[in-house]
């Protein structure tokens, strides 16, 4: 259970939430919604104990499993399977057993006997924690999320961002916490995994708070909705399912509009009467009373809800380049014993539209990293054509430095712009005032996406390498980005699970990984996008 009382949240001087009180009990499945930057991720971090409220208290009973948007944490040299098992402490037990097994071969009898005793003690501990059945349970969870056994045996550092996020989600679910706090859990999941997760969470008997732009997930899952209203810094609580919430929220908006109109009409009449009465000295006191009543009427009215702001995204004309600005030949990449792909060729012509498809782990992110020069291929070469300027959007935002501010990132990306011009660009991406002084490390997933896109806009790139660019975005911001991609005159190489993004791109060609097969795009391939 989680109980919050008079919680106040701030991002620097900006008030996000004021005097919010609520409770999440076993069986509650809560959808936490609000526009990008409203404070949803901040609230989840506070509830998970990873941040402190500016005021108020949060009490937690039982265990909490928290899935953040950025899962690049922990020991990246650990095996994926051990990361999942660490949720119940099994990883340390199994590591100890492996060490004891090796020590049993020691020629020294005393050390060999000690190893046998250690192994027996650890085996008892393993049994207490669920034994080998728990390992099988963890593997089953992972498989349901699209992580085969071959991936579980690899170090985390060799996995793609999507695979690492699946590992972290599997770890949270395997932990069996009483309350789950999940921030965009369907990011990087294919259609089958999303369906499995939806069914799995419906069976969760504890509390659940989920932040998601996946409205189908919310409609199928939530029994309550917490709406974080950025205009009022308030948390509106609806004890309703998703579709009933949408109807009720619209009814509430209409009611507030009527109340505002009536209050303004009454206040205007009172104020007009007060103005007339002030002309007579005998009625001055009564006039003051009427004026105060008018002020109280207006003070009790909620402010008119502002339309949600949307980042204005327009790519400038790309820098001039040759006919084939980017080409790759014979690319291969492996991480240890894990072979990602071999002998991949790709030619990115001027203005080309290319979609890269493949199951998770097929090497889509790895290919973009190679093309962007972030990593080196094991074999093959990447040739830069005349005038090449690459703009790379990384799905895990690893191109952003956590300790640098929003404005510092813009200064590095566009040193030729004045600070006023840099602030104007950032303002079009909804970073204004003190927001530009926020370190990238404290930004929400949606804010990081907007910053990364702002840096792309000023890059003057003629080849865009885009890895899941629509993740973490509300529908309006997603539509703006897709519209900008339609208009972009340069070349685009796109990796996405978003069928709408592929439709907006109108691709010319498709590259299928890990085989490296390149072909002309056809409508029949659209069904593969959600499975990729």
Image: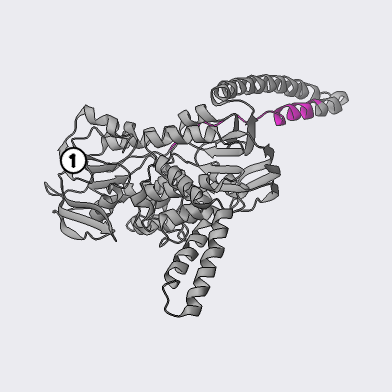
334 relative to 166, above or below: below
Is 304 positioned to the left or the right of 146 in the image? right
Q: Which quarter shows the C terminus? A: top left
Residue range highlighted in magenta: 290-310
Would residue 288 be counted in the magenta stretch?
A: no
Q: Residue furthest left?
A: 323
Is 60 positioned to the left or the right of 79 in the image? right
Q: Nearer the viewer, residue 234 or 416?
A: 234
92 relative to 389, above or below: below
Q: Nearer the viewer, residue 15 or 375?
A: 375
Is 258 positioned to the left or the right of 376 in the image? right
Q: Nearer the viewer, residue 170 or 266?
A: 170
Quadrant assignment, res 377 = bottom left
Q: Nearer the viewer, residue 217 or 340?
A: 340
Q: How is the image coloured?
A: one colour
Q: What is the x, y in percent for residue 436?
A: 48, 52
Quadrant assignment, res 300 = top right
Q: Could you tell me which residue is drawn at 35 percent across and 51 percent down?
A: 151
Q: Residue furthest right?
A: 282
Q: What is the x, y in percent for residue 421?
A: 38, 50
Q: Is residue 107 visible?
A: yes
Quadrant assignment, res 311 = top left
Is 328 positioned to the left or the right of 431 in the image? left
Q: What is the x, y in percent for residue 16?
A: 60, 44
Q: What is the x, y in percent for residue 303?
A: 63, 31
SS label for mark 1: loop
Instruction: Bin the neighbour count of mark 1 within 10 Å (Cα to Cα): few under 14, some 14-19, many 20 and up.
Output: some
Q: Mark 1 — residue?
A: 352
Q: Could you tell me which residue is drawn at 52 percent across and 35 percent down?
A: 201
Would residue 304 be counted in the magenta stretch?
A: yes
Q: Could you tell me which residue is drawn at 43 percent across and 32 percent down?
A: 195
């Amino acid at each position: 259970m989680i109980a919050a009382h008079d919680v106040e949240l701030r991002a620097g001087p900006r008030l996000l939430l004021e005097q919010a009180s609520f409770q999440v009990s076993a069986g509650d499945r809560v959808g936490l919604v609000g526009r990008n930057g409203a404070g949803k991720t901040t609230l989840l971090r506070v509830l998970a104990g990873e941040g402190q409220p500016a005021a108020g208290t949060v009490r937690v009973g039982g265990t909490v499993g928290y899935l953040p948007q950025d899962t690049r944490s922990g020991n990246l040299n650990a095996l994926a399977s051990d990361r999942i098992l660490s949720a119940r402490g099994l990883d340390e037990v199994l590591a100890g057993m492996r060490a004891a097994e090796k020590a049993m071969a020691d020629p020294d009898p005393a050390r060999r006997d000690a190893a046998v005793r250690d192994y027996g003690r650890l085996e008892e501990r393993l049994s207490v924690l669920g034994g080998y059945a728990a390992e099988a349970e963890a593997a089953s969870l992972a498989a349901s999320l699209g992580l085969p056994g071959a991936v579980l045996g690899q170090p985390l550092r060799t996995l793609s961002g999507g695979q690492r996020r699946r590992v972290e989600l599997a770890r949270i679910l395997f932990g069996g916490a009483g309350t789950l706090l999940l921030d965009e859990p369907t990011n990087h999941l294919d259609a089958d995994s999303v369906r499995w997760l939806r069914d799995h969470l419906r069976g969760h008997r504890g509390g659940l708070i989920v932040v998601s732009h996946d409205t189908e997930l919310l409609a199928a899952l939530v029994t309550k909705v917490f709406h974080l209203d950025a205009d009022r810094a308030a948390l509106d609580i609806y004890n309703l399912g998703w579709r009933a919430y949408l109807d009720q929220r619209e009814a509430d908006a209409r009611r507030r509009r009527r109340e505002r109109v009536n209050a303004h009409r009454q206040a205007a009449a009172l104020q007009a009467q007060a103005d007339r009465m002030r002309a007579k000295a005998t009625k001055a006191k009564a006039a003051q009373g009427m004026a105060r009543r008018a002020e109280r009427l207006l003070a009790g009215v909620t402010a008119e809800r502002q339309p949600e702001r949307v980042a204005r995204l327009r790519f400038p004309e790309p820098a001039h380049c040759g006919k084939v600005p980017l080409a790759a030949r014979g690319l291969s990449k492996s991480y240890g014993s894990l072979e990602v792909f071999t002998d991949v060729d790709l030619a990115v012509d001027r203005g080309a539209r290319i979609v890269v498809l493949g199951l998770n782990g097929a090497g889509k992110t790895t290919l973009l990293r190679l093309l962007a020069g972030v990593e080196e291929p094991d074999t093959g070469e990447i040739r830069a054509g005349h005038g090449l300027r690459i703009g790379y959007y990384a799905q895990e935002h690893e191109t952003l430095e956590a300790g640098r501010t929003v404005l510092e990132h813009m200064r590095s990306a566009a040193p030729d712009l004045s600070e006023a011009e840099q602030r104007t660009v950032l303002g079009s991406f909804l970073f204004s005032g003190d927001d530009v002084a926020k370190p990238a490390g404290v930004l929400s997933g949606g804010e990081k996406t907007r910053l990364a896109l702002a840096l792309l806009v000023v890059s003057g790139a003629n080849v865009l390498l885009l890895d899941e660019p629509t993740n973490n975005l509300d529908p309006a911001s997603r539509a703006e980005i897709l519209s900008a991609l339609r208009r972009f005159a340069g070349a685009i190489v796109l990796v996405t699970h978003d069928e709408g993004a592929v439709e907006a791109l109108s691709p010319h060609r498709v590259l299928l990984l890990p085989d490296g097969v390149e072909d002309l795009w056809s409508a029949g391939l659209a069904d593969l996008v959600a499975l990729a």
